[in-house]
């Protein structure tokens, strides 16, 4: 059985093909709220229907569709038999996957936390794209899973990282991660690097306002079909600012000599060994209740990563 989005705003548990390759019995999967909400609401642009396909996807973005990319399970066949591995695969109780898509969990990483692997890989890619310098003044706008993980990783290089969100209830999350928190309305000064991860027009415009001279913005959000209006006069022009998209489907050119997708995912899994990251799991449902809970999970602004237990 798999979680299917059968039409905009409606999910059901229905049978699904298990595909080809090595057999995996799912233990947990994670709902990645930002992207899955766009899919759930039918807001994936037709132009991106190919680039947005996930491994194991069935159906199309025009519905019905089986979509997701945060699964952890027991490998039942092949050289990895008996191991627990992460796989970029939709929410499904049993599936087959190519051997190369299975990433064994490193020692010390519990499968319950490993559902964050795809998000951590994205955050790692953001840090590469950012070219952050030691002790550079950094702001991250948007304290969702991606923004919080990006701030967590950036704080390993810079001791001057501020996580910004419109929601004051995110402050305890930042405290647990050891990162300074600020509300959007606060007077924050200027930053050399701003990572935008709120997927809002206001957030991206704030990123422009917060940049110092020749500051750079890393756009980590994906807006789907949403149109965004930016203020590109004023400080954007006079301060010679730059905006760069960071997307996990590509690896920064300056990293390609030493890194590939397999190694990058392996590093993301290693970074998840830190138990403090459990604070990014905001709830859990049994898989058999996933269809009933899905809309509420996606529409609740307090949701971080919601875990499904199989």
Image (spheres, rainbow, N blue to C red):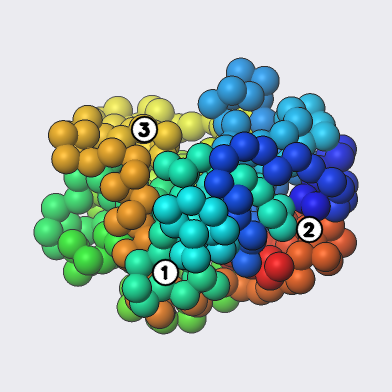
Could you tell me how far apart the alpha carbons at marks 3 and 2 are, in whole angstroms? 29 Å
Label ID, residue 250: 3
Residue 2 placement (x, y as % from top left): 77, 50
Q: Relative to 160, is 38 above or below?
A: above
Mark 3 and mark 1: span between their CA atoms?
A: 31 Å
Q: Which one is earlier in the sequence, the residue at label 3 or at label 1?
A: 1
146 lies above or below 310 = above
Q: Quadrant of the C terminus?
A: bottom right
Gap in angstroms between the C-alphas marked 2 and 1: 30 Å
Task: Judge the density around disc 3: few (<14), some (14-19), many (≥20) Cα neighbours within 10 Å.
Answer: few
Q: Is residue 182 visible?
A: yes
Q: Is there any visible trace of residue 226 in the rendered image? A: no
* Residue ID at (29%, 47%): 263
Q: Earlier in the sequence, mark 3 or mark 2?
A: 3
Residue 305 quadrant = bottom right
> Which structural element holds mark 3?
loop
Q: Which residue is mark 1?
A: 182
Quadrant position of residue 248 = top left
Instruction: Find residue 58 and report its image quarter.
Output: top right
Residue toward you, 197 or 64: 64
Crowding around mark 2 (Cα neighbors within 10 Å: few <14, some 14 to 19, many 20+) is: many
Identify the mark nearer the N-term, 2 or 1: 1
Instruction: Give the residue number, with chain letter if any, for mark 2.
Output: 294
Front of the two marks 2 and 1: 2
User: Picture coordinates of residue 40 (x, y %)?
Assistant: 75, 43
Query: In the picture provided, is 19 more to the left or to the right than 8?
Result: left
The residue positioned 14% from the left and 53% from the top of the image is 133
Q: Is residue 272 left or right of residue 91?
A: left
Q: Nearer the viewer, residue 131 or 260?
A: 260
Residue 117 image point, x, y percent? 45, 58
Q: Is residue 8 left or right of residue 158?
A: right
Which circle, 3 or 1, is nearer the viewer? 3
């Amino acid at each position: 059985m798999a979680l299917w989005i059968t039409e905009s705003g409606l999910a059901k548990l229905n049978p699904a093909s298990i595909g080809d390759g090595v057999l995996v019995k799912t233990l947990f999967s994670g709902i990645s709220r930002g992207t899955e909400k766009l899919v759930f609401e039918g807001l994936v642009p037709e132009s991106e229907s190919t680039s947005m396909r996930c491994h194991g996807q069935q159906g199309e973005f025009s519905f019905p569709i089986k979509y997701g990319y945060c699964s952890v399970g027991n490998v039942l066949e092949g050289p990895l038999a008996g191991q627990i591995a992460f796989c970029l695969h939709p929410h499904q109780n049993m599936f087959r996957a190519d051997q190369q898509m299975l990433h064994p969990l490193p020692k010390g990483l519990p499968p319950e936390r490993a559902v964050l692997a795809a998000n951590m890989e994205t955050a790692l890619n953001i840090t590469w794209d950012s070219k952050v310098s030691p002790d550079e003044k950094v702001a991250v706008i948007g304290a969702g899973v991606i923004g919080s993980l990006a701030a967590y990783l950036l704080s390993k290089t810079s001791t001057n990282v501020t996580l910004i969100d419109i929601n004051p209830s995110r402050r305890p999350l930042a405290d647990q991660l050891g990162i300074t928190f600020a509300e959007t309305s606060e007077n924050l000064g200027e930053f050399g690097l701003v990572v935008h991860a709120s997927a809002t027009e206001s957030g991206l415009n704030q990123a422009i306002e917060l940049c110092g001279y020749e500051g750079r913005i890393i756009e980590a959000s994906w807006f789907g079909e949403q149109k965004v209006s930016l203020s590109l006069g004023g400080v954007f022009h006079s301060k010679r600012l730059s905006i760069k998209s960071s997307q996990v489907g590509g690896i920064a050119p300056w990293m390609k000599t030493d890194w590939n997708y397999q190694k990058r995912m392996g590093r993301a899994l290693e970074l998840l060994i830190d138990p403090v990251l459990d604070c990014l799991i905001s709830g859990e449902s049994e898989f058999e209740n996933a269809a009933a809970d899905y809309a509420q999970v996606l529409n609740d602004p307090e949701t971080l990563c919601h875990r499904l237990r199989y």
